[in-house]
Amino acid sequence: MEEGQGRQGPGPRWKKGKDAKDFAAVAAAKPMSRIVAKLQASLKDSEAMAILSGDGGDAILAIGRKQAKLLNRAAFGRHIENAGEEERQWFQLRPEEVFFLCHALKCISVQSENKKQMDEAQLWDLFTSTSEPFPEMYKAYQHLRLKNWVVKSGLQYGADFVAYRHHPALVHSEFAVIIVPEGKEFGSRCGRLQVWSDLLCALRASGSVAKTLLVLTISTKGCDLASSDCLGQLIVHERAITRWIPQQCREQHEKPQREEANGDVQIQKPCSEDASKEEREETREGVAFSYWGVILSFTILSSLLVYKLKF
């Protein structure tokens, strides 16, 4: 799933801009990897600080207008309308986004609600205590984000995430992502999609909204999920699953047959016309033969009658 390359599936569905603007060309001219790199450098220079909310999940990031523009173009967080300051912009970040900017990109610092500085270990302890599946959810988020896919919540589509090829304003999401952990370390969370009916429901739900179902299996060979060091030992397996629709496949195979049948009809039509011509010619020849036969018969009878009259 590299940037600019699609997996097996329907492919990207680019949105239509004003005056038929080509959003695919816009995305190609400004790849997501370049935007994220600019954002990373800008946030480091400005020493951006995110403040955790009271429930220990989301965080609020206050940044300047330049950083806000880059953060929006990189599709991180959700902009919060503020009526007070014009030079400062506020964004709400999800836990996966907070830890990605802090741990993977190392471009922001994080404070608790009481203004206490928090390191990566403290953040990991907080996020795993408030959300049990955070280790596998973050690993999947990081896996896709490092491959330059834009990752957003897939709750409205019955999935964990949805993946966009570029900014959601330019293109529709391409994949509905479901995370499936494997290993005794994940406990009871390993039961997802083990029943055929669950997989079929997820497949039909993603297909009904024109998305390919992407199952990310997170496996491990024994690591301690209580520490962020486990991220290097977690392995991600990608599986894109699509439905096989017999009607469509049958129609695709029947279409050439119908074309061949039409060709046969077109071939048979001239043949029938040739046969009709031959029949008409034979009929004319038969009529002509009968005509000359009558004349010959009349001539013979006339000759015999004259011969008898003479004698």
Image (spheres, rainbow, N blue to C red):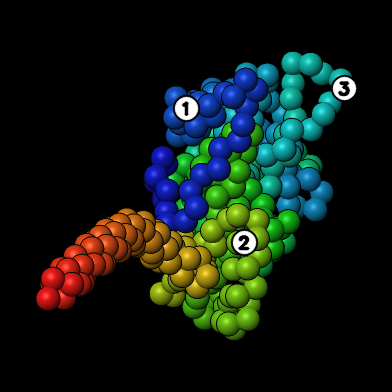
- Where is residue 209 shown, x and y percent of the image? 65, 56
Asked whether, in this view, residue 114 is left or right of residue 268, the answer is: right
Nearer the observer: mark 3 or 2; the answer is 2
Dot 1, how many residues are within 10 Å of its Cα: few (below 14), some (14-19), or many (20+)? few
Residue flagged by tag 3: what amino acid is it? Ala
The answer to whether any part of residue 298 appears in the image is yes
Q: N-terminal of the two: label 3 or label 1?
A: 1
Do the numbered discs 1 and 2 sit on residues whose CB atoms are within 8 Å?
A: no
Looking at the image, which residue is at 43% across and 66% down?
Answer: 254
Q: CA distance from mark 3 to mark 2?
A: 39 Å
Is residue 275 or residue 298 the one in the foreground?
Answer: 298
Q: Which residue of the protein is positioned furthest toward the front in this rendering? A: 311
Q: Which residue is mark 3?
A: 83
Q: Which residue is mark 1?
A: 25
Q: CA distance from mark 1 to mark 2?
A: 27 Å
Q: Which residue is mark 2?
A: 206
- Where is residue 245 shown, x and y percent of the image? 52, 70
State whether residue 9 is above or below residue 132: above
Asked whether, in this view, residue 33 is left or right of residue 275, the answer is: right
State whether residue 98 is above or below residue 241: above
Nearer the observer: mark 3 or 1; the answer is 1
Q: CA distance from mark 3 to mark 1?
A: 35 Å
Residue flagged by tag 1: what amino acid is it? Ala
Quadrant of the frame with the C terminus: bottom left
